[in-house]
């Protein structure tokens, strides 16, 4: 990953970027400390200066993904209406369809892997899907659907995460476009 090697960011930031990339591309369990160090262009021994344990690297990876969601949420909140925000979220997801076809959902895949591992990282990974669900619920409440807000949020997130899994399994990015059209049409009925 040439971008990491030419990056002016510090070693810790490069290590986190490398771990995030490798976890998404190959899975967190498959990414060795040596792989992460090589990807970040950092000597292997330096990894332990920044991260004493593999779990600390996992913590940093989860924190980085959560920061990405917070950044996205900040951009979406600038849109005028909750419906516009939800449609933009759908469009952003579909905009990643080629990558999703090759690697899966960047949030769902990582959360599922950490949940399977159990322990501290499993607990920390839960908000990776729970926070977007909570955000969607707030959007539906603002749209005035009342007590149905949570069910609507579950429907939307399940549709996006489910089609991401189908897209990865089939390698067919068009599936995301099909589901996105259905979800947009559904939003128009609310």
Image (cartoon, rainbow, N blue to C red):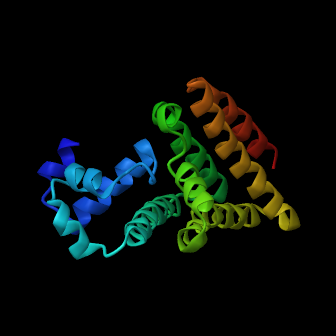
Residue 114 lies in quadrant: bottom right
Kindly identify the residue that appears in the image at 83 percent across and 58 percent down.
151
Image height of 184 relative to 41, above or below: above
Q: Is residue 179 left or right of residue 2?
A: right
Task: Give percent across and percent down for residue 35.
Answer: 28, 50
Q: Nearer the viewer, residue 98 or 39?
A: 39
- Residue 176 in view of the camera: no
Relative placement, left or right, of 175 versus 147 is: left
At which x and y percent is residue 93? 55, 43
Which residue is rendered at x = 31% and y = 76% of the image?
Answer: 52
Up/down of 120 relative to 141, above or below: below
Quarter of the view holding residue 147: bottom right
Residue pictured at 66% horizontal, 33% vertical: 166
Which quadrant of the view contains residue 85? bottom right
Q: How many marks?
A: 0
Q: Position of residue 41 (x, y in %)?
A: 15, 53
Going by the image, does 11 lie left or right of 164? left
Pick the front one: 94 or 45: 45
Quick one: 140 or 151, which is closer to the camera? Answer: 151
**Residue located 28% across and 54% down the image:** 36
Q: Give the residue at the far right of this rendering.
A: 147
**The N terminus sits in image quarter:** top left
Name the spot of residue 129 as percent of width and height, x first: 62, 60
Above or below, 56 against 136 in this view is below
- Look at the image and tell me whether residue 54 can be seen: yes
């Amino acid at each position: 990953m040439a971008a990491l090697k030419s990056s002016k960011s510090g070693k810790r930031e490069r290590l986190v970027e490398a771990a995030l990339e490798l976890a998404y591309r190959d899975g967190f369990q498959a990414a060795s400390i040596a792989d992460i160090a090589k990807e970040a262009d950092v000597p292997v021994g330096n990894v332990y200066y920044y991260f004493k344990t593999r779990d600390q690297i996992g913590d940093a990876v989860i924190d980085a993904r959560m920061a990405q969601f917070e950044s996205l949420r900040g951009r979406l909140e600038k849109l005028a209406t909750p419906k516009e925000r939800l449609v933009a979220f759908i469009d952003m997801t579909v905009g990643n369809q080629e990558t999703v076809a090759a690697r899966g959902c960047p949030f769902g895949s990582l959360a599922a892997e950490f949940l399977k591992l159990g322990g501290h990282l499993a607990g920390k990974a839960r908000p990776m899907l729970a926070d977007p669900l909570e955000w969607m619920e707030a959007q539906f409440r603002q749209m005035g659907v009342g007590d149905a807000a949570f069910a609507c949020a579950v429907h939307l997130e399940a549709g996006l995460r489910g089609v991401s899994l189908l897209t990865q399994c089939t390698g067919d990015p068009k599936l995301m476009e099909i589901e996105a059209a259905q979800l947009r049409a559904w939003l128009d009925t609310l």
